[in-house]
Amino acid sequence: MLVIEGLQQRYGNLLTKMLKQNALAIADFMIDTNTKINSSDNHKMNIIDALDRVSDFYDNKKPFKEMTRENILSFLDSFRKVEISDPQHKWIGTYNLYRAMIVKFFKWLYYPNIESSKRPKVSIISYTYKGILDLL
């Protein structure tokens, strides 16, 4: 598979264990992205990891196109930590990184033929970010 060429075998394994339509969506997204920005291997690995975690959060049984805003919020909320276990709020960086990748992917998933800078937000990802002050 061209998408995982040059990546560790683990990334191919992640794609083969998930729902076929999710794996194909990730592959198509990465091919589209790579033709526009020539993604680094690290970027590709981060995308696969993030989207695999979303898929795995729902036991690899829920297609991306069937996910709701609440599904995405539940996934992102799984990164939250209480003050005692994370007094420096490091979880917020992870939350924001995953959120950014998810937003980009779902905009592409629903509007693949629109230039990336002009893609509208889709309802599944609208307002998933509450603001840093609300998260603390």
Image (tube, grey):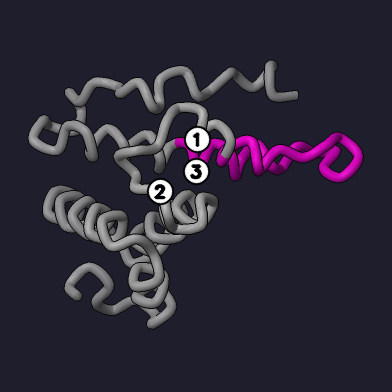
Amino acid bearing label 2: Lys
Magenta segment boundaries in residue numbering = 75-99
**In the drawing, what numbered circle is on residue 98?**
3
Residue 132 percent across, percent down from the top left: 64, 22
Query: Local crowd at mark 1 within 10 Å, few (<14), some, or many (≥20)?
Result: some
**In the drawing, what numbered circle is on residue 71?**
1
Q: Residue at x 77, y 40 (%)?
A: 81
The residue at the far right in this view is 84
Circles 1 and 2, Cβ within 8 Å, touching? The answer is yes
Task: Report, in whole angstroms, how far the alpha carbon at label 3 lies from the one at label 1.
Answer: 14 Å
Query: Local crowd at mark 3 within 10 Å, few (<14), some, or many (≥20)?
Result: many
For the N terminus, the image quarter is bottom left
The residue identified by callout 2 is 62
Task: Report, in whole angstroms, how far the alpha carbon at label 3 lies from the one at label 2.
Answer: 18 Å
Does residue 121 sit above or below 68 in this rendering?
above
Q: Nearer the viewer, residue 134 or 93?
A: 134
Amino acid bearing label 3: Tyr
> First in sequence: mark 3 or mark 2?
2
Per the image, is 71 magenta? no
Q: Decide if residue 117 is on the left or right side of residue 9.
A: left
Q: Nearer the viewer, residue 117 or 114?
A: 114
